[in-house]
Amino acid sequence: MSYTVAIAGATGLVGRTMLRVLEERNFPIKELKLLASARSAGQVVSAFGKEYIVEELTEHSFAGCDIALFSAGGSTSKQYAPYAAAAGCVVIDNSSTWRMHPNAPLVVPEVNAYALEHHHGIIANPNCSTIQMVVALQPIHEQFGLKRVVVSTYQSVSGAGQKGVDHLQAEIQGKEPESRISTHPLAYNTVFHSITDASGFSEEEIKMKNETRKIMNLPDVKIAVTCVRVPVLGAHSESVNVETEKPMTVESIRAALQGKPGITLVDDPINAVYPTPVAASNKDDVFVGRIRLDDSVENGAHLWVVSDNLRKGAATNAVQIAESLVAHNWLRFEPVEQW
Amino acid sequence: MSYTVAIAGATGLVGRTMLRVLEERNFPIKELKLLASARSAGQVVSAFGKEYIVEELTEHSFAGCDIALFSAGGSTSKQYAPYAAAAGCVVIDNSSTWRMHPNAPLVVPEVNAYALEHHHGIIANPNCSTIQMVVALQPIHEQFGLKRVVVSTYQSVSGAGQKGVDHLQAEIQGKEPESRISTHPLAYNTVFHSITDASGFSEEEIKMKNETRKIMNLPDVKIAVTCVRVPVLGAHSESVNVETEKPMTVESIRAALQGKPGITLVDDPINAVYPTPVAASNKDDVFVGRIRLDDSVENGAHLWVVSDNLRKGAATNAVQIAESLVAHNWLRFEPVEQW
């Protein structure tokens, strides 16, 4: 079997990474349809040894498509994903639009592939910093029972797309950026994501809390989040403090994580062997290290979790969802009347 | 009154900052003696509108000195500070050598200036990341009773001295650094301090825990620390999660911090007003913002704490200790037989 796949937002940083990941993993493509806004339509993009002309995304783009990978921003997803679903095409959407929607499963295949079984045509790909954290937390939860997580992130500027990369690189070169992702400088600085909530939490922090609960199906798990952008080009790092029901040792945590799908243990502290964003870049796994017991609480431990935010945090996870749908023959779905 | 002041390690990054801070604060200097290793002796350094020739640090350097500010590394402090004290000169030492010594007060004047009263000639200046954290925690503790702290740091490369700055800048310019402070790249990366303890904690992490307890005189307070270096040139940031005995609100935390010595509140999240290392550089205060309640625990809150690690984290705090000794007339001391 092979499938007609559309990519909405094919010229963006995540869209281009989706193409690379589909190629690398030999996803069974029958036809490929590259879609973008009117502004980007007409661009020529190489993939699978061919050249594709990017078409303008419209309501009618999805006729005959099996799967549409969306990474074109929230408002585009909100507007066009329902048209795709109505045309019988399964949307895997990388924006935040549908993530908390009760009809949309929010999926990290290593954690909750089961949630894909009875979807309704729109499947949400979680936030990048959430994905890598839940991949690491799930085996901890299964073995020791997760009670509370206190996480502080060290996020790369590519989380804000090409614009973020360009902003940092311009400043590092001493130039004025053409457009900015923060009113503060990014170079040699630490900044925060957009804060619009009266609680003082950023949108990114609220996402990490809500999405983790939904993906892990732990609606009451305690989560305290601080999300920070650092002058890193690609891959997010996370300082994750966990509190569990059952006692842990460094060895039992390593044993719980070792060999789990999507996880690579990098943890030989005395020899300075630990995950870093530079080493994790362009890789698909979630890298975990600096496992230490935290004696400040009963059953506490520290983890350092690093992954490429454009890959496992976005493109790779979306393609893995597509692979899972195909492998289980779950592409067909019961539509809902209204999204 | 004016005083004869020696600076041991006068050519290093902290030593040079100590000179600037003494000038800026008009410390009452009678004579200034700049000391360094044989390698740096003979260098000419400008300060207080004069030129000084750096002398070689020896056992006899401290005759006639009232105060010696040491920032010449741990082994130099260990070797020479006792000679200074034996000569009746009060040492304020920036290395980690004497910090946990029972005869050496470990002082952040905003927190425990009282500990200077009965010193024995060697006073320890705490670790940079510890200083800024305890300045922020002390008013929280006084108001709400501190139970537990979970902190993740975002530390600048200048914490490793000029060598750290040179390593990062070389890599940013695409050059091989002449010497390295980490086997991992610093540019666009996150790395850890030296890890030598079997627990997996870095020396920096162990310092933050032990020093915080000693300075705040809270030997049992719960502290969980992860220390990280980020590609920032100057000023450390800290994501600090606190748990207290009494309930807090965002307003009551702000009220507790507002106007306290050494603290500047920078906290208007909706308008993206928060502390950053770029903005905190070359300033003496500890900047606190992103105050949020943490609903994952009873009486929890988040703080973001930023300060210039060469100033409040090192030079300024050392000079403030000297000012406090002078103001209280606490320069004279009862010597101990052996250090």
Image: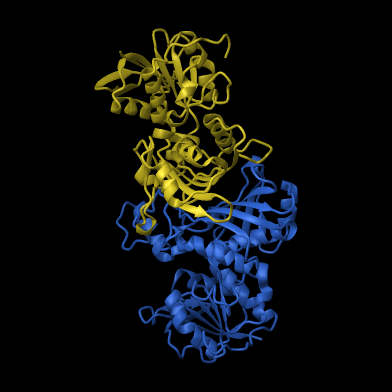
Chain colours: A blue, B yellow
Residue B200, above or below A317: above
Coordinates of residue B248 in the picture (x, y in percent) = 49, 49
Quarter of the image where the N terminus of chain A is located: bottom right
Indicate left or right for B38 with A134 as reference. left
Residue that protrudes farthest toward the front in the picture: B246
Residue drawn at point x = 42 percent, y = 15 percent: B330
Residue B233 visible within the image? no
The number of numbered discs placed on residues in the rendered structure image is 0
Residue B132 image point, x, y percent: 45, 37
Judged left or right of residue B97, residue A41 is: left
Q: Nearer the viewer, residue B101 or A39?
A: B101
Of all residues, the one furthest to the left in this rendering is B49
Image point (55%, 39%), residue name: B193
Q: Position of residue B276 (x, y in %)?
A: 39, 48
Indicate left or right for A293 with B2 as reference.
Answer: right
Whether residue B147 is visible, yes or no, is yes
Q: Nearer the viewer, residue B146 or A314?
A: B146
Q: Which residue appears at 67% of the width and 48% of the height?
A: A300
Residue B289 x, y percent position in the rendering: 41, 48
